[in-house]
Image (tube, rainbow, N blue to C red):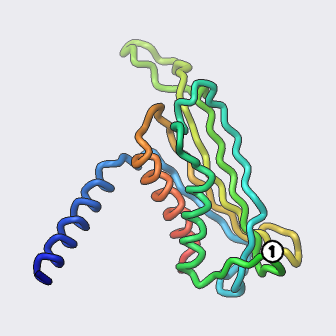
């Protein structure tokens, strides 16, 4: 029976990896910067400042009914903080964490003109999203680190795809922070 358990576990893990690989992430751009001398190891605890969401999605195309993107992002950030030895506290944190998600389903963007003879770019409607994460030192009330992910947002994605893309973005932002 034990050998079947190992086999089933290996199969489920393989399917999970294959499923994650099918979610496109090549449009997600990630960057992060820290204040001079910032080292996360200087801090042991954190608290949430809160979150803000700026969404221009009048038809509800980006966030499907029953999916709470704010909770998902907070869960992913908590996971990354714990992996780095940080502990969430209610009072007297060493670090304050905030995030901002902005989605605009109606951005106009200059694109290459598809007409082969045309030289001027054309305006085209696209959907863009951004996720920003900021660490603030409560003693100085100054940001000490910030990371962001920018992406093209497609309407009507499945919840598993949205989760996978958010996971990719948050993980990528924290990779810029290091361990």
Q: Residue at x 58, y 59 (%)?
A: 31
Considering every residue shown, the one lying at the far right of the view is 140
Q: Residue at x 54, y 56 (%)?
A: 30
Give whichever of 21, 123 is nearer the camera: 21
Give the class, few, some or many, for how many residues have Cα within 10 Å of label 1's Cα (few <14, many ≥20): some
Element marked by disc 1: strand
Q: Is residue 120 left or right of residue 106?
A: left
Q: Residue at x 59, y 66 (%)?
A: 77
Q: Residue 108: x percent and y percent?
A: 60, 25
Vertically, is 118 above or below 68?
Answer: above
Vertically, is 5 above or below 12?
Answer: below
Q: In the figure, residue 54 lies in which quadrant? A: top right
Considering every residue shown, the one lying at the far front of the view is 1
Give whichever of 114, 168 is nearer the camera: 168
Q: Is residue 109 left or right of residue 115?
A: right
Q: Residue 153: x percent and y percent?
A: 51, 37
What number of labels is visible?
1
Q: Residue 115: x percent and y percent?
A: 39, 14
Q: Residue at x 78, y 69 (%)?
A: 136
Q: In the figure, residue 142 lies in which quadrant? A: bottom right
Give whichever of 115, 139 is nearer the camera: 139
Quadrant including the N terminus: bottom left
Which residue has dot 1 on it? 137
Q: Residue 157: x percent and y percent?
A: 43, 37
Q: Is residue 137 left or right of residue 152?
A: right
Q: In the figure, residue 146 lies in which quadrant? A: bottom right
């Amino acid at each position: 029976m034990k050998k079947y358990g190992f086999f089933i576990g290996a199969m489920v893990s393989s399917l999970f990896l294959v499923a994650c690989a099918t979610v496109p992430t090549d449009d997600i751009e990630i960057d992060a910067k820290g204040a001079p001398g910032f080292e996360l190891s200087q801090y042991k605890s954190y608290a949430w400042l809160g979150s803000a969401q700026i969404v221009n999605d009048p038809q509800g195309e980006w966030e499907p009914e029953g999916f709470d993107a704010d909770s998902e992002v907070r869960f992913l950030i908590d996971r990354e903080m714990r992996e780095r030895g940080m502990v969430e506290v209610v009072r007297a944190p060493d670090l304050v964490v905030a995030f901002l998600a902005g989605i605009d389903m109606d951005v106009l963007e200059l694109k290459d003109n598809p007409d082969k003879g045309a030289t001027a770019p054309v305006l085209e409607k696209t959907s863009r999203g951004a996720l920003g994460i900021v660490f603030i030192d409560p003693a100085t009330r100054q940001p000490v680190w910030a990371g962001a992910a920018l992406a093209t947002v497609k309407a009507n994605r499945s919840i598993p795809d949205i989760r996978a893309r958010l996971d990719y973005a948050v993980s990528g932002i924290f990779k810029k922070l290091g361990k």
